[in-house]
Amino acid sequence: MNKQGGAFLEQIVQQIYELLFSYKIIKAYNCMTRLRILLGSTDGLPLEKIKAFDNVLGTAVNGSELQIILGPGKAEKAAVLMQKLLEKSAERSEAQNNDAFGEAEKVHAAVKAKNATPFKLLLRTIANIFLPLIPAFIACGLITGLLNIILKVDPALSAQPLLKVLQVAGTSVFWGMNIFVGVNAAREFGASPMLGGTMAVIITHPMLAGITVFGEELSPGRGGIIAVLLVVAFSSWLEKRLHGLIPQMFDLFLTPLLVILLSALPALLILQPIGGMAADAVGTAVTGAIDSGGMFTGFILGGIFLPLVITGLHQGLTPIHAQLLSQYGVTVLLPILAMAGAGQVGAACAVYVKTKNQRLKKTILAALPVGIMGVGEPLIYGVTMPLGRPFFTACIGGAFGGSVQAAYHVGASALGISGLPLFAATDNIAGYLAGLLTAYGVGFAATYLAGFDDPA
C-alpha cells in the first residue's frame, strides 16, 4: 500500500478520531496545511501519539482547537474524512438519544463563546472575505510576472495579440476586485451577496466621474477595497434591519430597493471619502515606512512576521496587501514578509545537518519542499517551534532577507504565494532572489551556530 494513498490517510484519520473521541470532537475543518479539530476539552491531549503517525508533521493547540500539520492536499482530505466520521457518530448517537446532538451543539456554542473575542472575530471575518480571492490573485499575479519576464527579453512581443490577451487575463482580478470584495463582504456580514456587489459597483462606476452632489465631486473607485468594506458593512446592516421591519409579502421587492436607495448617497458622500482617506493613509504609511526606513524597516518586518503567523495576527495584513495592489499594482510588503518562510527553510536545513534523530530528519524532508514553495506551517509546527531556538534563528534569517527586499524595493503583483514561486510575480527578480538566498543562508548559519537540544 502506498503510504501517501487515500486508504492510508483514512486509516490515520480513523486512529486520530479514536484517540480524540473522549475529548468531545465538535467540528473538523482545514486550512492549507492543517487539519483543525474543535474540541470540548484539551486537557491531556495525546499529542505525542498523534505526532508518531506517518504523514503527521507536527501539532499545535490554539485555545480549544487542535491543529494537526499534514501538508497541502492531505489536510483537506483529512478534514472531509474526519467530518464524515463525526456525521456517522452523530447519526448513531441520535438513534440512541435524541438529545445527544443538542448537547454537542451546546458545547460547540460554549467553546465559540469562550474564544470569540471581538478582535479575533474581526480578523476571522477579514480573512474569510479575502481567502476566496487568493486563487485569482495567484493566477493573475503569476501571469503578469511571467509576461514581464517575456517582455524584458523581447519588448516587441507586446504587439502580439496573444500577449495582449494574456495581459488582459493578468490584470482581470484587479478590474473586478471591488465587486468580488463586495460580494464576499456582504456574505460574511449576513446580507445578500449580490446587493453587496451592487454597492461596490455603485462606488466604482466610471459614470461617477464629472458628477457633483452637494458641492462634492464624486470619484469612481476612490478608497479601493477599504471604501468597499465600509459601504457594504453599512448596506448589510441596513438590509438586515429592513428585513425585520418590512412585512414578508413586500420584503422581496422593497428591501433591496430601499437598500440601494438609502445606501447610495451615504456611500458616495460619507463612507467613500472616509475610505479614500484611510486607503491613502495605509498606502502612504507602508510605502513611506519602507522608503524612509529602508533596510531597517525590512529587517523589523521580516523578523516579526513568524510570531504574527503563530498568533494569527497576519490575517489582518491581507486587506493591506490587497489595497496596495489596487493602489499601486504591486505590494512592497509581501516580498519582505515572505522572507520569514525562507528563514524557516534555512533553519530547517541546519537542523537536518546537525540532528541525529532520524524521525526529525524524515519530518524535515517531508516539510522542506512545501516550505520552499512558500507554505511554512509544517516547518514551524513540526520542526523549529518545538525545538525552541531554531524558531528564533529562523526569524533572524527572515529579518536579514527582509532588509534586502526593502533595499531593492521589490514589489509583487500577486497575493497568496510566497517562497520561491513568488519570484515570477515580482518586479525585481534579481533583488527578490538575492533576499531569498540571504534568508536561507542567514537562517542556516544562525541555527547552526546557536544549536538546539537534539530530541532523543
Image (cartoon, rainbow, N blue to C red):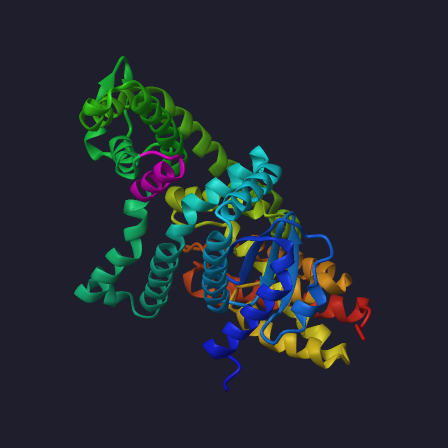
Locate residue 61, reporting x and y percent.
Answer: 66, 54
* Residue 210 visible at all: no
Who is closer to the viewer here, 76 or 448? 76
Magenta stretch, main secondary structure, is helix
Q: Residue at x 64, y 74 (%)?
A: 364
Taking 72 as reference, is 67 left or right?
A: right
Q: Residue at x 48, y 58 (%)?
A: 92
Q: Is residue 280 magenta?
A: no
Locate residue 418, reporting x and y percent.
Answer: 50, 61
Magenta residues, start to end = 178-191
* Residue 338 visible at all: yes
Q: Is residue 90 above or below residue 179?
A: below
Name of the residue lying farthest toward the top = 214
Q: Residue at x 34, y 70 (%)?
A: 153
Give the mark count.
0
Q: Is residue 411 above or below residue 226?
A: below
Taking 280 as reference, is 153 left or right?
A: left
Locate residue 53, reporting x and y percent.
Answer: 63, 74
> Residue 239 appears in which quarter of the rendering?
top left
Q: Is residue 196 above or below residue 374?
A: above
Q: Is residue 189 magenta?
A: yes
